[in-house]
Image (cartoon, grey):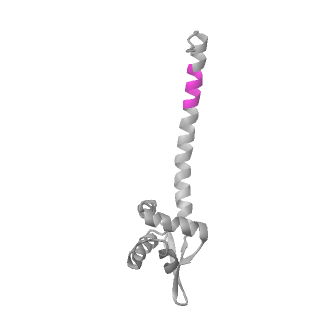
Amino acid sequence: MAPAPAITAVFGALSDPTRLAIVERLLKEGEHSAGEIAAPFAISKPAISKHLRVLEDAGLIERRVARQWRVCRIRPEAIRLVDDWMREYRKFWEGSFDRLEQVLAAAETEEGENGRYDE
């Protein structure tokens, strides 16, 4: 089994539009052969192979041999890693927006009490 992916490697791999599209497709459709993955892209098969290698090295996908095909699929632990990372920042931003909302509501109340409405 491959080691757990590192968040910087995962985001680095996802920073390329082609690799991101590959990951999105695998998430939506499940596993595909390398040839099926290459089909919708207007780039060479060796270029697709390089993209798949980057995704595999980052821990986002795993490849296995099924007869004569190399089949790729998402490694769920990499997606969980991104979700966990985003969850922490989501908490921060939601808390920040809640505090901003309270400050704005207090300022609005204060303006109303002082008779300063802009109408």
* 37 versus 70 height, above or below: above
Name the residue located 55 percent from the left edge and 63 percent from the top edge. 79
Name the residue located 47 percent from the left edge and 75 percent from the top edge. 38
Name the residue located 58 percent from the left edge and 9 percent from the top edge. 115
Picture coordinates of residue 116, whole percent (x, y): 56, 11
Picture coordinates of residue 60, whole percent (x, y): 50, 68
Magenta stretch, main secondary structure, is helix
Picture coordinates of residue 78, whole percent (x, y): 52, 65
- For residue 13, what is the image quadrant? bottom left
- For residue 113, what is the image quadrant? top right
- For residue 17, what is the image quadrant? bottom left
Picture coordinates of residue 69, whole percent (x, y): 52, 86
Quarter of the picture containing the C terminus is top right
Name the residue located 45 percent from the left edge and 71 percent from the top edge. 41
Q: Which residues are magenta?
A: 100-107
Using the image as rendered, state which of residue 108 and residue 29 is in the foreground: 29
* 73 versus 116 height, above or below: below
Count of residue discs: 0
Asked if residue 104 is among those painted magenta in the image, a careful observer would answer yes
Residue at the farthest bottom position: 67
Asked if residue 22 is among those painted magenta in the image, a careful observer would answer no
